[in-house]
Protein backbone atom coordinates (compact mmCIF):
# COMPACT_ATOMS: atom_id res chain seq x y z
CA UNK A 1 0.00 0.00 0.00
CA UNK A 2 1.36 3.41 -0.85
CA UNK A 3 -1.39 5.96 -0.36
CA UNK A 4 -1.08 8.72 2.24
CA UNK A 5 -3.61 8.09 4.99
CA UNK A 6 -5.10 9.98 7.94
CA UNK A 7 -4.55 9.91 11.69
CA UNK A 8 -5.46 11.82 14.83
CA UNK A 9 -4.85 11.94 18.70
CA UNK A 10 -4.66 14.27 21.73
CA UNK A 11 -1.96 16.44 23.31
CA UNK A 12 -0.03 15.06 26.26
CA UNK A 13 3.30 13.34 26.65
CA UNK A 14 3.17 9.56 26.08
CA UNK A 15 3.99 7.65 29.24
CA UNK A 16 6.38 4.72 29.35
CA UNK A 17 4.89 1.49 30.68
CA UNK A 18 7.92 0.16 32.48
CA UNK A 19 10.08 -2.90 31.99
CA UNK A 20 8.52 -5.98 30.43
CA UNK A 21 9.28 -7.92 33.59
CA UNK A 22 7.40 -5.45 35.81
CA UNK A 23 3.99 -6.64 37.10
CA UNK A 24 1.22 -4.95 35.08
CA UNK A 25 -1.83 -3.19 36.44
CA UNK A 26 -5.07 -5.06 35.77
CA UNK A 27 -7.79 -3.29 33.79
CA UNK A 28 -11.52 -3.72 34.16
CA UNK A 29 -11.74 -6.26 31.32
CA UNK A 30 -8.99 -8.51 32.68
CA UNK A 31 -6.16 -7.37 30.39
CA UNK A 32 -3.26 -5.57 32.08
CA UNK A 33 -3.14 -1.80 31.74
CA UNK A 34 0.04 -0.04 30.65
CA UNK A 35 2.13 0.60 33.76
CA UNK A 36 3.69 4.00 34.41
CA UNK A 37 6.65 2.68 36.41
CA UNK A 38 10.09 4.03 35.60
CA UNK A 39 12.20 1.61 33.57
CA UNK A 40 15.42 1.46 31.59
CA UNK A 41 15.23 3.21 28.24
CA UNK A 42 14.31 1.08 25.25
CA UNK A 43 17.11 -0.06 22.93
CA UNK A 44 16.11 2.58 20.34
CA UNK A 45 15.89 5.45 22.84
CA UNK A 46 17.26 8.63 21.27
CA UNK A 47 16.41 7.55 17.71
CA UNK A 48 14.10 10.04 16.01
CA UNK A 49 11.76 8.83 13.28
CA UNK A 50 9.64 10.87 10.86
CA UNK A 51 6.81 8.63 9.65
CA UNK A 52 4.85 9.85 6.65
CA UNK A 53 1.26 8.78 7.30
CA UNK A 54 0.05 5.84 5.26
CA UNK A 55 -1.73 2.51 5.42
CA UNK A 56 -0.78 -0.70 7.24
CA UNK A 57 2.94 -1.47 6.58
CA UNK A 58 4.33 2.04 7.16
CA UNK A 59 2.52 2.59 10.47
CA UNK A 60 3.39 -0.95 11.53
CA UNK A 61 7.10 -0.30 10.95
CA UNK A 62 6.78 2.93 12.93
CA UNK A 63 4.99 1.07 15.72
CA UNK A 64 7.77 -1.53 15.88
CA UNK A 65 10.34 1.24 16.28
CA UNK A 66 8.27 3.21 18.80
CA UNK A 67 7.62 0.03 20.78
CA UNK A 68 11.35 -0.23 21.45
CA UNK A 69 11.93 3.35 22.46
CA UNK A 70 12.26 5.40 19.25
CA UNK A 71 10.68 8.84 19.21
CA UNK A 72 8.27 8.63 16.28
CA UNK A 73 6.65 11.76 14.82
CA UNK A 74 3.85 10.87 12.43
CA UNK A 75 3.38 13.48 9.70
CA UNK A 76 -0.19 13.42 8.40
CA UNK A 77 -2.23 15.59 6.08
CA UNK A 78 -3.44 18.88 7.57
CA UNK A 79 -7.06 18.02 6.82
CA UNK A 80 -6.83 14.67 8.56
CA UNK A 81 -5.59 16.38 11.72
CA UNK A 82 -7.93 19.36 11.77
CA UNK A 83 -10.96 17.17 11.08
CA UNK A 84 -10.52 15.39 14.40
CA UNK A 85 -8.98 18.06 16.57
CA UNK A 86 -7.18 16.64 19.57
CA UNK A 87 -9.29 13.51 19.88
CA UNK A 88 -7.03 10.44 19.89
CA UNK A 89 -7.57 7.79 17.26
CA UNK A 90 -7.68 4.35 18.91
CA UNK A 91 -5.33 2.70 16.44
CA UNK A 92 -2.88 0.20 17.90
CA UNK A 93 -0.28 1.03 15.25
CA UNK A 94 -0.24 4.66 16.38
CA UNK A 95 0.65 3.85 19.97
CA UNK A 96 3.56 5.74 21.46
CA UNK A 97 3.76 8.21 18.57
CA UNK A 98 3.30 11.98 18.28
CA UNK A 99 1.39 13.48 15.35
CA UNK A 100 1.31 16.69 13.34
CA UNK A 101 -0.36 17.72 10.10
CA UNK A 102 1.80 19.24 7.37
CA UNK A 103 0.93 20.36 3.85
CA UNK A 104 3.65 18.75 1.75
CA UNK A 105 2.25 20.24 -1.46
CA UNK A 106 3.19 23.67 -0.16
CA UNK A 107 6.76 25.01 -0.50
CA UNK A 108 6.55 26.14 3.11
CA UNK A 109 5.44 22.67 4.17
CA UNK A 110 8.32 21.06 2.29
CA UNK A 111 10.78 23.51 3.87
CA UNK A 112 9.39 22.68 7.29
CA UNK A 113 9.67 18.95 6.62
CA UNK A 114 13.32 19.40 5.66
CA UNK A 115 13.95 21.17 8.96
CA UNK A 116 12.33 18.26 10.78
CA UNK A 117 14.45 15.81 8.78
CA UNK A 118 17.61 17.70 9.69
CA UNK A 119 17.05 16.65 13.32
CA UNK A 120 15.83 13.12 12.55
CA UNK A 121 17.57 9.77 12.28
CA UNK A 122 14.99 8.01 10.12
CA UNK A 123 12.30 8.88 7.57
CA UNK A 124 9.61 6.37 6.60
CA UNK A 125 8.37 7.11 3.07
CA UNK A 126 5.13 5.31 2.11
CA UNK A 127 4.55 6.92 -1.30
CA UNK A 128 4.76 5.33 -4.73
CA UNK A 129 8.18 5.61 -6.41
CA UNK A 130 8.91 9.16 -7.55
CA UNK A 131 6.25 10.90 -5.44
CA UNK A 132 8.64 11.99 -2.69
CA UNK A 133 11.06 13.33 -5.32
CA UNK A 134 8.29 15.36 -6.96
CA UNK A 135 7.38 16.81 -3.58
CA UNK A 136 11.03 17.69 -2.92
CA UNK A 137 11.50 15.33 0.03
CA UNK A 138 13.21 12.39 -1.68
CA UNK A 139 16.43 10.82 -0.41
CA UNK A 140 18.73 13.25 -2.25
CA UNK A 141 16.75 16.26 -0.99
CA UNK A 142 16.93 15.14 2.62
CA UNK A 143 20.48 13.83 2.55
CA UNK A 144 21.49 17.31 1.45
CA UNK A 145 20.40 18.57 4.87
CA UNK A 146 21.25 15.44 6.88
CA UNK A 147 23.73 12.94 5.46
CA UNK A 148 23.22 10.63 8.46
CA UNK A 149 19.53 10.18 7.72
CA UNK A 150 18.24 6.64 7.16
CA UNK A 151 15.59 6.87 4.45
CA UNK A 152 13.20 3.90 4.52
CA UNK A 153 11.00 3.44 1.45
CA UNK A 154 7.94 1.19 1.83
CA UNK A 155 6.22 0.04 -1.35
CA UNK A 156 4.53 -3.06 -2.68
CA UNK A 157 6.59 -3.61 -5.84
CA UNK A 158 9.83 -1.81 -4.99
CA UNK A 159 11.50 1.26 -6.44
CA UNK A 160 12.11 -0.23 -9.90
CA UNK A 161 10.84 -2.96 -12.20
CA UNK A 162 7.91 -2.97 -14.64
CA UNK A 163 5.28 -3.01 -11.85
CA UNK A 164 6.88 -0.32 -9.67
CA UNK A 165 4.49 2.47 -10.69
CA UNK A 166 1.30 0.38 -10.57
CA UNK A 167 -1.19 -0.01 -7.73
CA UNK A 168 -1.47 -3.17 -5.69
CA UNK A 169 -2.41 -4.68 -2.37
CA UNK A 170 -1.12 -7.44 -0.13
CA UNK A 171 -2.88 -10.14 -2.15
CA UNK A 172 -1.17 -8.98 -5.36
CA UNK A 173 2.30 -8.85 -3.83
CA UNK A 174 2.15 -12.32 -2.28
CA UNK A 175 0.71 -13.66 -5.54
CA UNK A 176 3.66 -12.43 -7.59
CA UNK A 177 6.09 -13.55 -4.84
CA UNK A 178 4.88 -17.13 -5.33
CA UNK A 179 3.67 -17.34 -1.74
CA UNK A 180 -0.07 -17.29 -2.38
CA UNK A 181 0.11 -20.35 -4.62
CA UNK A 182 1.03 -22.49 -1.60
CA UNK A 183 -1.82 -21.42 0.66
CA UNK A 184 -5.13 -23.27 0.76
CA UNK A 185 -6.75 -26.68 0.98
CA UNK A 186 -6.23 -29.50 -1.47
CA UNK A 187 -8.45 -29.04 -4.50
CA UNK A 188 -9.33 -25.52 -3.45
CA UNK A 189 -8.26 -22.14 -4.73
CA UNK A 190 -5.36 -20.17 -3.22
CA UNK A 191 -6.50 -18.53 0.04
CA UNK A 192 -4.88 -15.31 1.29
CA UNK A 193 -4.13 -15.26 5.06
CA UNK A 194 -5.78 -11.82 5.43
CA UNK A 195 -3.06 -9.20 4.82
CA UNK A 196 -0.41 -10.51 7.19
CA UNK A 197 2.19 -11.82 4.73
CA UNK A 198 2.56 -8.81 2.44
CA UNK A 199 1.64 -5.76 4.47
CA UNK A 200 2.93 -6.71 7.88
CA UNK A 201 5.47 -9.56 7.75
CA UNK A 202 6.90 -8.92 4.28
CA UNK A 203 6.41 -5.16 4.47
CA UNK A 204 6.38 -3.30 7.78
CA UNK A 205 8.44 -5.81 9.72
CA UNK A 206 11.09 -6.00 6.97
CA UNK A 207 11.26 -2.21 6.84
CA UNK A 208 11.76 -1.97 10.61
CA UNK A 209 14.49 -4.60 10.32
CA UNK A 210 16.09 -2.62 7.49
CA UNK A 211 16.03 0.55 9.58
CA UNK A 212 17.87 -1.17 12.41
CA UNK A 213 20.43 -2.58 9.94
CA UNK A 214 21.00 0.88 8.44
CA UNK A 215 21.35 2.50 11.87
CA UNK A 216 23.90 -0.16 12.80
CA UNK A 217 25.87 0.40 9.60
CA UNK A 218 25.75 4.17 10.15
CA UNK A 219 27.76 3.69 13.33
CA UNK A 220 30.59 2.44 11.12
CA UNK A 221 30.25 4.73 8.08
CA UNK A 222 28.73 7.90 9.53
CA UNK A 223 26.26 8.04 6.63
CA UNK A 224 22.63 7.10 6.24
CA UNK A 225 21.28 4.63 3.69
CA UNK A 226 18.20 4.37 1.50
CA UNK A 227 16.14 1.24 2.21
CA UNK A 228 14.10 -0.21 -0.66
CA UNK A 229 11.58 -2.34 1.29
CA UNK A 230 9.24 -4.03 -1.19
CA UNK A 231 6.45 -6.26 0.04
CA UNK A 232 6.91 -8.62 -2.90
CA UNK A 233 10.56 -9.10 -1.89
CA UNK A 234 9.73 -9.54 1.77
CA UNK A 235 7.01 -12.11 1.09
CA UNK A 236 9.37 -14.12 -1.13
CA UNK A 237 12.05 -14.05 1.58
CA UNK A 238 9.59 -15.42 4.13
CA UNK A 239 9.05 -18.41 1.83
CA UNK A 240 12.75 -19.10 1.23
CA UNK A 241 12.53 -22.59 2.74
CA UNK A 242 9.60 -23.51 0.50
CA UNK A 243 11.41 -22.38 -2.64
CA UNK A 244 14.02 -24.97 -1.72
CA UNK A 245 11.35 -27.58 -0.98
CA UNK A 246 9.64 -27.04 -4.33
CA UNK A 247 12.86 -27.38 -6.31
CA UNK A 248 14.00 -30.46 -4.41
CA UNK A 249 10.76 -32.32 -5.10
CA UNK A 250 9.89 -32.45 -1.40
CA UNK A 251 6.83 -30.18 -1.80
CA UNK A 252 3.80 -31.22 -3.81
CA UNK A 253 0.56 -29.53 -4.87
CA UNK A 254 -1.19 -27.10 -2.51
CA UNK A 255 -2.82 -28.73 0.50
CA UNK A 256 -1.14 -32.13 0.14
CA UNK A 257 2.00 -31.60 2.19
CA UNK A 258 3.14 -32.04 5.74
CA UNK A 259 2.67 -28.41 6.85
CA UNK A 260 -0.23 -27.15 4.69
CA UNK A 261 -3.11 -29.27 6.10
CA UNK A 262 -2.29 -32.18 3.82
CA UNK A 263 -1.15 -34.31 6.76
CA UNK A 264 -3.66 -35.33 9.47
CA UNK A 265 -1.04 -34.68 12.15
CA UNK A 266 -0.83 -30.98 11.24
CA UNK A 267 -4.35 -29.61 10.96
CA UNK A 268 -7.34 -28.30 12.89
CA UNK A 269 -10.30 -30.35 14.07
CA UNK A 270 -13.79 -29.40 15.18
CA UNK A 271 -14.91 -30.31 18.70
CA UNK A 272 -18.36 -31.23 20.04
CA UNK A 273 -19.22 -27.61 20.87
CA UNK A 274 -18.39 -26.28 17.41
CA UNK A 275 -14.97 -24.99 18.42
CA UNK A 276 -11.60 -26.26 17.22
CA UNK A 277 -8.26 -27.63 18.33
CA UNK A 278 -4.95 -27.35 16.51
CA UNK A 279 -2.88 -30.50 16.11
CA UNK A 280 0.86 -30.29 15.44
CA UNK A 281 2.06 -33.71 16.54
CA UNK A 282 4.67 -34.10 13.80
CA UNK A 283 7.32 -36.05 15.69
CA UNK A 284 6.59 -39.73 16.42
CA UNK A 285 6.89 -39.30 20.21
CA UNK A 286 4.40 -36.44 20.22
CA UNK A 287 2.06 -38.39 17.95
CA UNK A 288 2.15 -41.40 20.23
CA UNK A 289 1.36 -39.26 23.24
CA UNK A 290 -1.58 -37.69 21.43
CA UNK A 291 -3.21 -40.91 20.26
CA UNK A 292 -2.59 -42.56 23.64
CA UNK A 293 -4.31 -39.74 25.51
CA UNK A 294 -7.17 -39.85 23.01
CA UNK A 295 -7.55 -43.58 23.52
CA UNK A 296 -7.15 -44.31 19.81
CA UNK A 297 -5.95 -47.78 18.88
CA UNK A 298 -5.47 -49.63 15.63
CA UNK A 299 -4.51 -46.58 13.59
CA UNK A 300 -2.65 -47.40 10.35
CA UNK A 301 0.95 -46.23 9.96
CA UNK A 302 1.10 -42.50 9.40
CA UNK A 303 4.33 -42.66 7.36
CA UNK A 304 2.34 -44.05 4.44
CA UNK A 305 0.47 -41.18 2.79
CA UNK A 306 -2.10 -43.64 1.53
CA UNK A 307 -3.25 -43.98 5.16
CA UNK A 308 -3.75 -40.26 5.74
CA UNK A 309 -7.46 -40.17 4.72
CA UNK A 310 -8.34 -42.95 7.18
CA UNK A 311 -6.30 -41.37 9.98
CA UNK A 312 -7.94 -38.00 9.36
CA UNK A 313 -11.39 -39.60 9.45
CA UNK A 314 -10.64 -41.29 12.78
CA UNK A 315 -9.25 -38.09 14.28
CA UNK A 316 -12.20 -36.05 13.02
CA UNK A 317 -14.68 -38.40 14.69
CA UNK A 318 -12.70 -38.57 17.91
CA UNK A 319 -12.27 -34.82 18.37
CA UNK A 320 -15.96 -34.32 17.58
CA UNK A 321 -16.87 -36.52 20.56
CA UNK A 322 -15.80 -34.02 23.25
CA UNK A 323 -15.87 -30.27 23.79
CA UNK A 324 -12.82 -28.11 23.35
CA UNK A 325 -12.56 -27.60 27.12
CA UNK A 326 -12.64 -31.35 27.67
CA UNK A 327 -9.82 -31.85 25.18
CA UNK A 328 -7.83 -29.09 26.87
CA UNK A 329 -8.08 -31.07 30.10
CA UNK A 330 -6.99 -34.26 28.34
CA UNK A 331 -3.85 -32.66 26.91
CA UNK A 332 -2.97 -30.28 29.75
CA UNK A 333 0.75 -30.39 30.54
CA UNK A 334 1.49 -32.88 27.75
CA UNK A 335 3.84 -32.91 24.77
CA UNK A 336 1.06 -33.98 22.42
CA UNK A 337 1.18 -30.60 20.63
CA UNK A 338 -2.61 -30.16 20.74
CA UNK A 339 -3.84 -26.64 21.53
CA UNK A 340 -7.20 -24.88 21.62
CA UNK A 341 -7.88 -22.52 18.73
CA UNK A 342 -8.59 -19.33 20.65
CA UNK A 343 -10.31 -16.22 19.43
CA UNK A 344 -8.60 -12.90 20.14
CA UNK A 345 -10.54 -12.25 23.33
CA UNK A 346 -9.72 -15.71 24.66
CA UNK A 347 -6.05 -15.33 23.74
CA UNK A 348 -5.68 -12.30 26.02
CA UNK A 349 -7.13 -14.31 28.91
CA UNK A 350 -5.22 -17.56 28.37
CA UNK A 351 -3.15 -18.44 31.47
CA UNK A 352 0.11 -18.66 29.53
CA UNK A 353 -0.36 -15.24 27.94
CA UNK A 354 -1.49 -13.75 31.25
CA UNK A 355 1.58 -15.13 33.03
CA UNK A 356 3.87 -13.56 30.42
CA UNK A 357 1.97 -10.28 30.33
CA UNK A 358 1.55 -10.79 26.59
CA UNK A 359 -1.38 -8.39 26.25
CA UNK A 360 -2.03 -4.94 27.64
CA UNK A 361 -4.88 -2.45 27.55
CA UNK A 362 -4.14 0.97 26.07
CA UNK A 363 -6.91 3.50 25.56
CA UNK A 364 -9.55 0.85 26.14
CA UNK A 365 -8.13 -1.51 23.49
CA UNK A 366 -6.55 -4.82 24.45
CA UNK A 367 -3.46 -5.35 22.31
CA UNK A 368 -0.23 -7.38 22.22
CA UNK A 369 2.80 -5.98 23.98
CA UNK A 370 5.97 -5.22 21.98
CA UNK A 371 7.93 -8.15 20.60
CA UNK A 372 10.58 -9.40 20.69
CA UNK A 373 11.54 -8.91 24.33
CA UNK A 374 14.99 -7.63 25.17
CA UNK A 375 15.32 -8.83 28.74
CA UNK A 376 16.54 -6.11 31.05
CA UNK A 377 15.71 -3.33 28.59
CA UNK A 378 12.77 -0.98 28.69
CA UNK A 379 10.46 -0.20 25.80
CA UNK A 380 8.58 2.72 24.31
CA UNK A 381 5.45 4.33 25.72
CA UNK A 382 2.30 2.34 25.02
CA UNK A 383 0.01 5.33 25.45
CA UNK A 384 -2.26 6.30 22.57
CA UNK A 385 -0.79 8.58 19.92
CA UNK A 386 -0.82 12.26 20.84
CA UNK A 387 -0.62 15.60 19.08
CA UNK A 388 2.70 17.44 19.16
CA UNK A 389 2.22 21.19 19.48
CA UNK A 390 5.72 22.20 20.58
CA UNK A 391 8.05 21.51 17.65
CA UNK A 392 11.03 23.51 18.89
CA UNK A 393 12.96 20.35 19.80
CA UNK A 394 12.47 19.20 16.19
CA UNK A 395 14.03 22.37 14.76
CA UNK A 396 10.85 24.43 14.28
CA UNK A 397 10.97 27.42 16.67
CA UNK A 398 7.71 28.61 18.18
CA UNK A 399 7.34 31.72 16.00
CA UNK A 400 8.13 29.78 12.85
CA UNK A 401 5.62 27.08 13.74
CA UNK A 402 3.01 29.70 14.63
CA UNK A 403 3.39 31.32 11.21
CA UNK A 404 2.96 27.93 9.52
CA UNK A 405 -0.20 27.27 11.54
CA UNK A 406 -1.66 30.63 10.65
CA UNK A 407 -0.95 29.92 6.98
CA UNK A 408 -2.73 26.55 7.23
CA UNK A 409 0.46 24.67 6.42
CA UNK A 410 0.89 23.10 9.85
CA UNK A 411 -1.73 21.52 12.13
Image (spheres, rainbow, N blue to C red):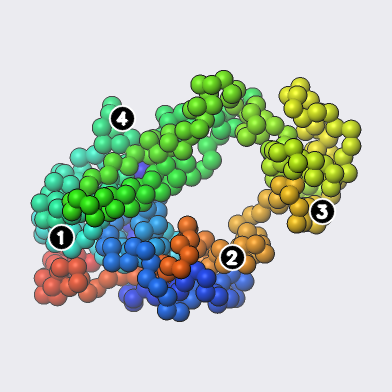
Residue 118 badge = 1
The tag earlier along the polypeptide, 1 or 4, is: 1
Whether residue 65 is visible here, answered yes or no, is: yes
Residue at 55% in and 75% down: 23
Of 332 and 54, nearer the camera is 332
State the image coordinates of residue 89 (x, y, percent, origin top left).
Answer: 40, 65
In three-dimensional space, the C-alpha distance between marks 3 and 1, rounded to whole angstroms, equals 60 Å
Is the C-beta separation of discs 4 and 2 under 8 Å?
no
Residue at 65% in and 62% down: 352
Residue 325 vertical placement versus 170 (above, below): below
**Crowd class of label 1 (few under 14; some 14 to 19; many from 20; radius 10 Å):** some
State the image coordinates of residue 16 (x, y, percent, origin top left).
Answer: 41, 73
Is the C-beta separation of discs 3 and 2 under 8 Å?
no
Of 307 and 11, nearer the camera is 307
Residue at 28% in and 63% down: 47
Residue corresponding to mark 3:
330
The tag earlier along the polypeptide, 4 or 3, is: 4
The tag earlier along the polypeptide, 2 or 1, is: 1
Where, by quadrant of the figure, is residue 158 drawn?
A: top left
State the image coordinates of residue 408 (x, y, percent, origin top left).
Answer: 17, 65
Which marked residue is nearer to the observer: mark 4 or mark 3?
A: 3
Which marked residue is nearer to the observer: mark 4 or mark 2?
A: 2
**Crowd class of label 2 (few under 14; some 14 to 19; many from 20; radius 10 Å):** few
In three-dimensional space, the C-alpha distance between marks 3 and 2, rounded to whole angstroms, equals 23 Å
Helix, strand or loop at label 4? It is loop
Residue corresponding to mark 2:
356
Amino acid sequence: MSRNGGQDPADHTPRGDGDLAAPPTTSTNGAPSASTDDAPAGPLAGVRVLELAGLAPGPFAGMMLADHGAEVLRVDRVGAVTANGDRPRPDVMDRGKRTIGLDLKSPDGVAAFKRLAATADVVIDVFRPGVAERLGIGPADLHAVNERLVYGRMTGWGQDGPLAATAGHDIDYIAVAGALSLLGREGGKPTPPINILGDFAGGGLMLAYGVVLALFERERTGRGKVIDAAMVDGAATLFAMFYHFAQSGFWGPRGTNLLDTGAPMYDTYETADGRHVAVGSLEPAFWEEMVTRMGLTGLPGRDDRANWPEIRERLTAAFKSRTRAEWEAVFEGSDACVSPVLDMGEAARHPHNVARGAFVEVGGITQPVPAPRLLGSGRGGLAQATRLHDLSAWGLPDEYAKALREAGVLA
